[in-house]
Image (cartoon, helix red, strand yellow):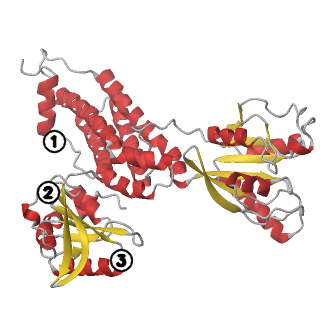
Amino acid sequence: MTDTPLAAHLSPLTAKEDTICAPATALGGALCVIRVSGPQAFDAVSAICSIRCHQCEANTVHYTHITDGDEIIDEVLVSIFRAPRSYTGEDSVEISCHGSQYILNKVMALLLHNGCRMAKPGEFSMHAFLNGKMDLSQAEAVADLIAATNRATHQIALSQLRGHFSGELTQLRHQLLELTSLLELELDFSDHEDLEFADRSQLLDLARRIDERITTLAQTYEAGQAIKAGIPVAIVGKTNVGKSTLLNRLLRDDRAIVSDIHGTTRDTIEDVINLRGVAFRFIDTAGIRQTTDTIEQIGIDRTYQAISRARIVIWLIDEEPTAAELYDMQNRCEGKSLLIVQNKIDLQPSNPACSNNTAFPHSSCSANSNTISALIPISAKHGLGMEALEAAIYDAAHLPDLQASDVIVTSARHHEALTRAHDDLQRVLDGLLHQLPGDLVAEDLHLVLTDLAEITGEDQIISSQETLNHIFRHHCVGK
């Protein structure tokens, strides 16, 4: 997606003249829904069945036959939606037919013959955007909602589709309008001694509050990306410590080869599981040890690469590590959550290998900018301690407590626009601090508005008339 708002690339006629059709459900099921939308939707569907769509009430469903001349193609249900109360904001019809490929092809051919054209990917949502049924961020959320594979990604996409992100941007726009109005007062009414308006300290306070919210939204991107792609968790440790056994236990499947032979795992193995509705992407790695085997060394190098990519690192041990090993692992995991997990407790239940290791943290703490958990004892072979480990993995992700209305940024495009808005707002703050003329500060404010407008694809620029209306309504001018 380019930086230019989508609306700038599209002709308004696209939403007004074309009637489009396409299957709205995946092939292979017992039923298929074909959506038809546009000014000729009712005519096209009426031409292939006995229903006169123009005469039907909105939001009604009708039983009929699709016919090709005297040939009956299928028994169907036809749902009628009238503009503007439809998904696209246009007259729309949805035909529910049987899922046969032959039936689908015949119905589509008949619709194309009667004035429709095949919809391009995402074009129904594009029509909805062009007709003001949703903004660009909501249209993007449709694809995320369809692609959601767990509760967290579903909740984030649904929140965005419902307009919670758009609502945040609207609030920011209102605050920017207040800031713009105060600057305009400073420029145009400063010679009127009987009028009161904000001084620079008030303007600075308002600009800082706006910047704080923009920054907070931008900072959710890291967590949003992790949730969307699956939070990467690297399982590392020495050879034969039980890393592959742990991966299989977490996945409830024999995904990795388990052997008593040292150095069995030569490459990383990845798979995904859901913990409390969030996807975690586990990476089983080659065992870390000194080796002269070239292939095994490549696997160990990839282990270190996996650590660098991971958000959480599970360091699996079965004996007390040296102080040097602990120091090295802490440095490699700087900025990440490090879980130290003692395996094979079934072999030494009364004498844990690390019970006397004072170098190990025995409660959550911070070291070298990484979060280290308390020592977690498990037996990957027998499943002992797995509940506590899974709880620790979830907690180590430091995810926000997702609510239905929470705004979490998952789009790189949105994050980039918010970052630019923050940078432009820094110039506004600098201009206010250094007493630059209001018209110069206003130019940077205009850039902030443009940055935020790119997220929704709507015209968020504040007009002169809107500024004047706000001034007279809220700042006592003309009383």
Give, as a three-letter code, the residue at label 2: Arg
Q: Position of residue 391 (x, y in %)?
A: 66, 39
Residue ID for mark 2: 82
Q: Is residue 314 above or below residue 375?
A: below
Residue ID for mark 3: 100
- Residue name at image x 91 percent, y 32 percent: 356
Determine if residue 189 is in view. no
Q: Position of residue 63 (x, y in %)?
A: 20, 65
Within-10-Å neighbours for mark 3: few <14, some 14–19, many 20+: some
Within-10-Å neighbours for mark 2: few <14, some 14–19, many 20+: many
Residue ranking furthest to the bottom: 70
Give, as a three-letter code, the residue at label 1: Ser
In contact (CB < 8 Å): disc 1 and disc 2: no
- Residue name at image x 27 percent, y 35 percent: 176
Q: Position of residue 180 (x, y in %)?
A: 23, 33
- SS state under label 1: loop
Real-space Cα separation, disc 3 to disc 1, in angstroms: 54 Å
Real-space Cα separation, disc 2 to disc 3, in angstroms: 28 Å
